[in-house]
Image (spheres, grey):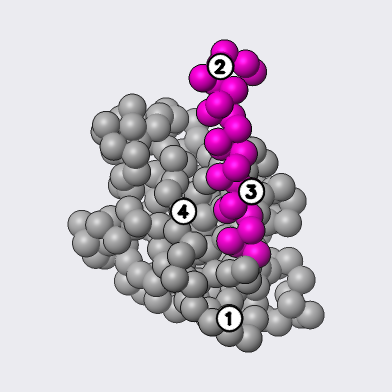
Amino acid sequence: MLMLVASQAPAEANPRSATGSPATRPLAMVVIGVAPAPKAFYPFCEKNPGECVVRGDAAAFRTTPERLAELEAVNREVNGTIRQVTDLEHFGVSDVWGFPDDGAGDCEDFALLKRRKLITLGWPSGRLLITAALDQNREGHAVLTAVTDGGDVVLDNKRDDIRNWRSTGYSFLTRQSQEVPSRWVFTAPPSEIQVALKRANTGVGARNMRAASGQR
């Protein structure tokens, strides 16, 4: 499971959209200040430095219908070929980021592979951002956000269709910076993230107690 970090939050900066102001880009996420990355992201970058640098010209890139079709194709291909498995089952530890080259991985591994495939097709890194969220069960989750000219859309290992981020039902917390892929930014005010994580941790605790007592 994706290990989320929301401690040491900086003072909030003025919100700005990743693809313009909220007034002009209502379907784009708003990013706020600098955020800590998920812990396992740092050793991933050390092992794969080429994946954490700027690739291509995001400003000049246009998301034509053909480019949007590439998102659909890559999302379906990876979802259909990679087997879902937790890091604990796979490696014996709780959180490892890497490419699922052996055909198995968890949510962030799906996202990393999709990002790599799309960059190979000519997408710039600034348009493809690994993003941390809480899913409908308030559990940690990672997806790939594609910043398109019509808004931010999500490539998710839980579904084959591409959805605008507002239509996923997820609470988005942090994601990679468009300008510096090795850095992360908040996608909600840190105060809201703290509340969301507290609720999520409470929910996980309740589920664990039910499981231990044999309840559903």
Kindly indicate whether the residue at mark 3 contacts the one at mark 2 (C-beta within 8 angstroms): no
- Residue 128 appears in the picture as rendered: no
Structural distance between the alpha carbons of marks 4 and 1 = 19 Å
Front position among marks 2 and 4: 2
Q: Residues within 10 Å of mark 2 (few under 14, many from 20)?
A: few
Q: Earlier in the sequence, mark 2 or mark 4?
A: 4
Structural distance between the alpha carbons of marks 2 and 4 = 27 Å
Structural distance between the alpha carbons of marks 2 and 3 = 21 Å
Type of the residue with mark 4: Leu
Structural distance between the alpha carbons of marks 2 and 1 = 42 Å
- From the top left corner, tell me how far across and down residue 62 is, in percent: 59, 72
Q: Earlier in the sequence, mark 2 or mark 3?
A: 3
Kindly indicate whether the residue at mark 1 contacts the one at mark 4 (C-beta within 8 angstroms): no
Callout 4: SS: loop
Residue receiving disc 4: 4
Q: Which residues lie in the magenta part?
A: 192-216
Callout 2: SS: loop
Kindly indicate whether the residue at mark 1 contacts the one at mark 2 (C-beta within 8 angstroms): no
Residue receiving disc 2: 213
Q: Earlier in the sequence, mark 4 or mark 3?
A: 4
- From the top left corner, tell me how far across and down residue 88 is, in percent: 33, 32
Type of the residue with mark 3: Arg
Q: Is residue 162 magenta?
A: no
Type of the residue with mark 2: Ser
Callout 3: SS: helix
Residue receiving disc 3: 199
- From the top left corner, tell me how far across and down residue 10 is, in percent: 49, 78
Front position among marks 1 and 3: 3
Location of residue 60 with respect to 29 vertically, above or below: below
